[in-house]
Amino acid sequence: MNSTLPHIEGQLIFRQTVPAFHNATVHVYLEDVSYADTTATALAHVIIPGVSHSKEETVIAFRLELKSNITINSTADYSIRVWVNKNNDGVLHSHDLFSDTRCPVLTHGYGNQVDILFH
C-alpha cells in the first residue's frame, strides 16, 4: 500500500433498523460524477467480502486506493457509491442495499474521509 497515492477512507454504518444479512459482498466505488447527463465513471473499486449485519449497529471500515494513472481534477466532482450484494452472487437484486445519498469526496472542500449511513 503506497500512502503517497490519493486514497479515500471511510466507514459504512448499518443502523439497527437495517434488516439483518449474512455473508454479503460490499462494493465501494469512487466515481467521477461531474456531468449530470452521462453515466458516472468509476475510478476505483474495492470489494469487501463476508460482511454480515445483525440487530446491532454494524460499522465496516474501508479504504480505496487510487492507481498511479488516475489524475484528480480539482474542478471535477467525485462521489462514493456503495452496493451491498446480499446474495453474494454479483447480480443486482431489488433486496440489495445501495447508498442513496451523494457522498462527495476529494474536491470542492471535501476531503478523503467519508461515512456512509444505511438506515
Image (spheres, rainbow, N blue to C red):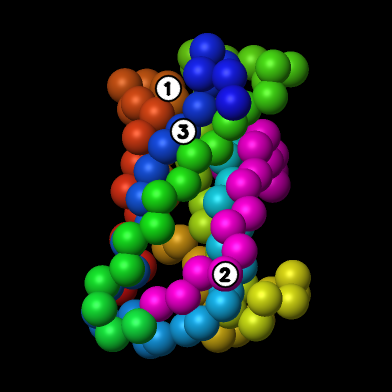
Quadrant (top left, top right, bottom left, bottom right) of the C terminus: bottom left
Would residue 52 appear left or right of 65 to someone viewing this image? Answer: left
**Decide: marks 1, 3 in contact (CB < 8 A)?**
no
SS state under label 3? strand
Q: Residue at x 62, y 47 (%)?
A: 46
Q: Nearer the viewer, residue 94 or 86?
A: 86
The foreground one among 85 and 93 is 85
Check the image and report above or below for 9 versus 24: above
Above or below: residue 6 compared with residue 99: above
User: Residue 6, how many percent across, how many down?
Assistant: 53, 20
Q: Is residue 105 visible?
A: no
Q: Quadrant of the N terminus?
A: top right
Q: Which residue is mark 3?
A: 8
Query: Which amino acid, by three-letter code, is at mark 1?
Result: Thr
| Magenta-colored stretch includes residue 43 | yes
Q: Amino acid at mark 3?
A: Ile
- Residue 47: horizontal and vertical position, in percent? 63, 54
Q: Describe the element under mark 2 as helix, strand or loop.
A: strand
Mark 1 or 3, closer to the camera: 3
Tell me which label, 1 or 3, sits earlier in the chain.
3
The magenta-colored residue range is: 34-53
